Image (tube, rainbow, N blue to C red):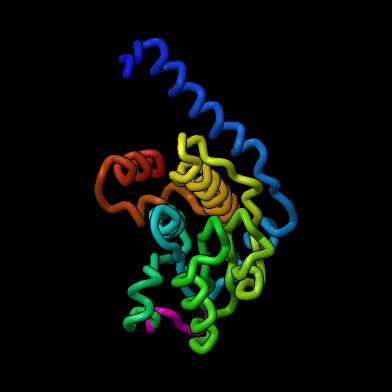
Amino acid sequence: MRKQTMSSILHRAREIIDFEAEILKKIPLDEHFESALHCLRKCTGKVITTGMGKAGKIAHKMAGTLSSTGTPACYLHPGEAEHGDLGLLGPGDVIIAYSTSGKTREVIEMLELSRHLGIVSIIGITSHPDSLIHDCAEIVINMGVIEEPCPLGLTPTASTVAMLAISDALALVLMEQKKVTRDDYGLRHHGGYLGLKARQAAAG
């Protein structure tokens, strides 16, 4: 196979980046996003994020972002939930479930069983809002039609970028509505560069 030139490699890389940027611009934000935000703001327990595979990585990151910005959250692996970790759930909790297909078996089973533990609401994030997740969740945020730039059309990259962007938007708007200050932020970052920067700014 002919060796790719540097210019052709960079051209292809730019195509992928531009492709994924266009996916973000087409996310159909609507009243479901607003409903999800209201649900998270009213949550009196924890926010539990969940997802399998690459979607699970985004769910894990969302839990960290929420926790650091004033909303207690943690990630629950759907596979581990089957073996007792479902006990993490309790009254007042809200679940954010990530599944591009909206029908990931482990996620759907976990959502169905979570009702027995007193959770308040389930928010689904998917590109197939009419799939099985629709029957489990009160609120479904539609990511829009997602095509992957992978040459096989399979590797989840554009879909996880969309999930991440929606998650960041939820977390940051929620942070603003809760009026989280630099001092609040610093209390949740007792070490590292961000914690130092937040405390210095609050002191100044």
| Residue at horizontal 43 percent and vertical 23 percent from the top | 13
Q: Is residue 10 in view?
A: yes
Magenta stretch mostly in which secondary structure? loop
| Residue at horizontal 54 percent and vertical 34 percent from the top | 20
Query: Where is 116 relative to 47, above or below?
Result: below
| Residue at horizontal 59 percent and vertical 66 percent from the top | 123
Quadrant in the picture for residue 83: bottom left
Q: Is residue 90 magenta?
A: yes
Quadrant in the picture for residue 73: bottom left
**How many labels sit on residues?**
0
Query: Where is 172 relative to 19, above or below?
Result: below
Q: Quadrant of the N terminus?
A: top left
Q: In front: 181, or 111? A: 111
Residue 146: % across, % down: 59, 45
Q: Is residue 168 magenta?
A: no
Q: Residue furthest toward the left?
A: 191
Residue 60: % across, % down: 39, 58
Q: Is residue 179 in view?
A: no
Q: In front: 95, or 68? A: 95
| Residue at horizontal 56 percent and vertical 58 percent from the top | 101
Lateral position of residue 146 relative to residue 188, left or right? right
Query: Where is 118 relative to 16, above or below?
Result: below
Q: Residue furthest toward the front?
A: 1
Q: In front: 50, or 45? A: 50
Q: Quadrant of the C terminus?
A: top left
Residue 165: % across, % down: 54, 44
Quadrant in the picture for residue 4: top left
Tell me where the magenta segment starts and ends, as one range: 87-92
Residue 68: % across, % down: 40, 55
Q: Residue furthest toward the bottom?
A: 116
